[in-house]
Amino acid sequence: MRESNRQDIKIQLTIAKQQGKLIEVHNIKDDDYFNVGFVVGIDNYFCLMISIDWDGKINGLIAIRLDSIITVNDQTDYLTTVSEKTKVAHEHHYFDIWQVQQFLDERPEITSGNILMNVLKDSADNQLPVVIGTKQYQGMDDFSGMIHDLNEITLNLHYFNEKDLSSMWSYDILISQIDYVRSRGTQMATTKQILEDVFHQD
């Protein structure tokens, strides 16, 4: 996989946004996992995508740090397959079960300005769980939980370990160390359910 520089990446993402292209965004080295979706916002540091899962349905929003992106692909066989699946999802009315498009239509300001802080503040203000990936763990681990405190420098996340539900944990994260944030999708909903049922937090 060819590594592109930051300017090339930003140009590719901008074109994808303008043309409404479904793309692959690879942001973790030596990992078969990558993000698929539509770019809806981009600033100097992050892009915001509507994430599409393997079943062809919207899986929430993801903000990805530009510096962490290794390459951007379009017109791959994988994307063709996912695109076909989105047609089925539309036809059977499960394409956007989390009403992400409606949220963006009602709150278009989240797609401009400081994208990372927009996403974090939306989740914090509305008490919605997030999934955060950091530079330290390079995709080997991410953290699902609730933002307890947020400022321009750091946030405090109350999170759980799905392999050890004995207690909640607290993690202070530098904003500058965040590589990606997932919100308003499947992981948000499942995290919320675990917090309610296991930790009695609502």
Image (spheres, rainbow, N blue to C red):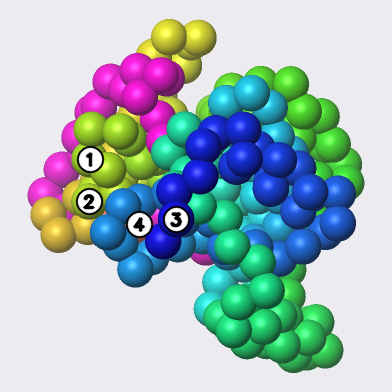
Quadrant housing residue 170: top left
> Which residue position holds label 2?
140
CA distance separating discs 3 and 2: 22 Å
Q: Amino acid at mark 2?
A: Met
Q: Residues within 10 Å of mark 1 (few under 14, many from 20)?
A: few
Q: Earlier in the sequence, mark 4 or mark 3?
A: 3
**At x 43% / y 38%, what residue is drawn?**
68
Q: Amino acid at mark 1?
A: Tyr
> Which residue position holds label 3?
2
Question: Disc 4, disc 3: CB below 8 Å?
Answer: no
Q: Is 176 or 163 nearer to us in this picture?
A: 176
Tell me, yes or no, whether the highlighted magenta stretch contains residue 167. yes
Q: Secondary structure at mark 2?
A: loop
CA distance separating discs 4 and 3: 40 Å
Question: Disc 2, disc 1: CB below 8 Å?
Answer: yes
Instruction: Please determine whether, in this image, residue 159 is positioned above or below residue 125.
Output: below
- In the image, is 21 to the left or to the right of 7? right
Instruction: Please determine whether, in this image, residue 25 is positioned above or below residue 55.
Output: above
Q: Earlier in the sequence, mark 1 or mark 3?
A: 3
Magenta segment: 165-192
Q: Secondary structure at mark 3?
A: loop
Quadrant housing residue 136: top left
Q: Position of residue 182 (x, y in %)?
A: 51, 47
> Which residue position holds label 4?
194
Q: Quadrant of the N terminus?
A: bottom left
Q: Secondary structure at mark 1?
A: loop
